[in-house]
Amino acid sequence: MVSFTSRVSFALLLLLLFATTFNGKIFSTSSLLVRCNENDQRLLSIFKEGVVDPLNRLSSWNTEEDCCLWEGVQCDITTGRVTDLSLSDRGLQGEINLCLLQIQFLKYLNFSYNHFKTVSTSPCQVSQSPTHRFHNRSLATVSTQQENFSATIHYLDFSYNYDLVINDLHWLSQISSLKYLDLSAVDIGSEAKWLQHMGMLPLLSVLRLSGCRLRHFPSLNYVNFTSLVTLDLSDNHINSMLPASFFNVTKDISVLDLGWNNFYGHIPIALFKLPYLKRLSLRYNQLRGSLPDWLDRHEHLQYFDISENLISGPIPSCFGNLSSLVFLDLSRNQLSGNLPISFGQVHNLKYLIIRGNSFMGVLAEKNFANLSRLTYLDLSSTGFKFHFDPNWVPPFQLESLDVSNTSLGPNLPAWLYTQRSLRGLDISTCGIANIDENVFWSIVSRIHSVDLSNNLISGDISNVTLHSSSISLDDNNFTGSLPHISSDVFYVSASNNAFSGSIFPLLCDSNATEVYHLDVSHNHLTGKLPDCWTNWKQLDHLNLGSNKLTGEIPPSMASLNHLQGLNLQNNNFFGKFSLDLSNWTNLVYLFLERNKFSGSLPNLQQKNLVVIQLRANQFTGNIPSQICSLSTVRVLDLADNMLSGPIPYCLYNIMNSYPTDDIYPIEAANLVSKGRELNYNDAFIVNSIDLSSNNLSGEIPKELFRMTQLWSLNLSRNQLTGKISKEIGSMKNLESLDLSFNKLYGKIPSTISNLSFLAYLNLSYNNFNGEIPLGTQIQSFELWSFVGNLELCGDPLPKICHKKEETDNSKLDEENEDDNYTKSLYLGMGIGFAVGFWGVCGSLFFIRSWRHKFFRLFGHLVDQLCVFVTLSFKSFH
């Protein structure tokens, strides 16, 4: 009997445990247990009516299913009342109906990371079919009752609905039980009283309003934040001084984030009135002055970030008293002086970031004496000098170290070899020349990200195998063949070294199938490209430029369909560039210049192409009209080839838009502009067309002169004819124009004087005539800009335009115009006389009645004339 009772008790215990595990939803499947409350279900149904659910995540929300089993809904296991509604990251759209806030026992509401656009306060009545109304008659009755927001809601999260706009927040003040509110990335910038509405929530302890497009601090009257512990106003547009009065109503606050705004002025001493402050972020503002010496009185402060401001002066020695400090970021300010010795006493410090300041002085081991917990150290771009004992062993094991752009070298400090936990190491531009090769490369092999660029490190690393996921060896003196690459590597950059030999072992004997960035440009690599590119399909950036590679392009390169950038410039490749690029839909830039490619231009139809640089090859044929469809192109360089035919008139269609997708950062481009080769780090803003040194013929399309965004235009050394269109005056941004060595003729249009940014002009060796247009900009150019035009005159040429000849020519033109006018007048009179004469005589000849009347009238006039003459004669006598 006891055994049976024990078994029953054990079974009941298992049942209770199972029910608890499934949060009470099992009770809804049994008629013996409590079902979902009808009014709660009604309000949930009203909410669903305004929701657009493209992913069908709310398919379980139907009347046949108990609402406690609906997606995201949780109910109390004893009462069946809805307590939690969590629909975060479900892809939902449409509106949020605030009828949900009337669910009587709702505590938790989370709609974060969706795509809602509006908040609705419409009447809480659900539209129902006749059948549904019959089965839910009690619901219709409930909808007429008084509707008030729940007094139990303590958690409300609408964050990261990036399209959500809330213009009225008055409803918030009615949720007096609210403790947690997150509206991050929701646009509430049009609500002028946002602070007052939230300040009327007496229990509110967490308020997150990051990225809400707030522009100002409203009045602090009637604000009651006595319970506030966390306040995040980061990433807004608040442009004001830090309001000292605000800190009088938030004395219990422990987390304060005001970063990424436009706060200015000094750090207010009112911050001292926050005795429980643990986390303070003021980064990316316009704060000035010095670091306050009272910060050490915040005995609980663990996180302090004031980076990217205008703070100046030294670091106060009192910072050494911040024993609780874990994170300190003072980067990119105007701080000076040395690092206080007292810093070595901040024994809890894990993150120290002071990069980008104007420090002076010496760093030694005493500055880090007791920092045993330090894991992240960033001293880059500072003025420190380093003086460490060669035998010093740091008390810490770093995970990340950045000392780039400092005077760390020429010898790599011995204490770095003791750091066995490093995951990130940046010692670029440190003047390092000497390393302990036996130890250094074994340490590097364990580091996830390594940057050794811009140093003086030398040596043959042919036998070294690179294991780091990301490694940069650029601008050193490494020799021998390229190092081996393991399957762990994703990013390799080894440009501007002295690597030699074939690229075959790197490409064909490697298991590095996940590499997406490979740059071995500006080395001494030789030989042909191997045909084993099918193993490198993840590549999106390939730079083999400025080597001594030769041969034709292997067919397997066509398999690199993820490629965004290809740079083969300045090698000895030859033959037709016949790769099928139809699958290279991501291509952004193509550098093929200074090779010996022949045949037609590559067939380029990629929608995101920005740079096409094919100069100094042997391409032939016409410029294909397909190029006109590449509206995103910013640099079109086809110079120094053997292209012929006309310039396509549709070329003005390029540079009309920007790439539609996220694109790989573009590398520097060398462009011939303003008469010399210039290096541009950002080719996205260059806007250049260079078709020079070809065999192009015909006229320059006048549409080309409508490209108002163009910076540089070079059509020199072709066979172009015709005149320069007066529309050239609309190219307001043009800085460089070269039309020299063509067969252009006519006058230089006066509108060229409108090009106020023009810094380089070459119209030499054409057939222009007449006077050079007057204008400060044009007359500022040297003589060589116009030489070789024998009929051209005027400043700055020595040939003077003779005004007498101009006057005579003008008079001759006027006489010719008068003569033509006279001839036209006489011709018109003759034609008019003939028409009039034959109009009258013809009528008299063909119409008898008109003829009889005419002669009777004529006879009558003759008789009257005779009588008049006879009487006049008698009167005279």
Image: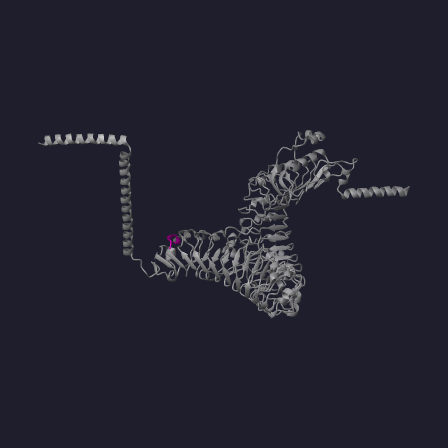
Q: Looking at this rendering, what residue extends furthest in the left direction? A: 877
Q: Give percent across and percent down for residue 453.
A: 58, 64
Q: Considering the image in quadrants, where does the N terminus appear?
A: top right
- 448 and 765: which is toward the camera: 765
Q: Is residue 395 left or right of residue 664?
A: right
- 118 and 483: which is toward the camera: 483
- Quarter-wise, where is residue 188 in the image? top right
- Quarter-wise, where is residue 483 in the image? bottom right
Q: Give percent across and percent down for residue 796.
A: 35, 60
Q: Give percent across and percent down for residue 749.
A: 38, 53
Q: Considering the image in quadrants, where does the C terminus appear?
A: top left
- The boundaries of the magenta stretch are 748-752
Q: Is residue 623 left or right of residue 160?
A: left
Q: Give percent across and percent down for residue 461.
A: 63, 69
Residue 682 visible = no
- 492 and 533: which is toward the camera: 533
Total numbered circles: 0
Q: Is residue 803 above or below residue 460?
A: above
Q: Residue visible at 47% across and 59% down?
A: 644
Q: Main secondary structure of the magenta part?
A: helix
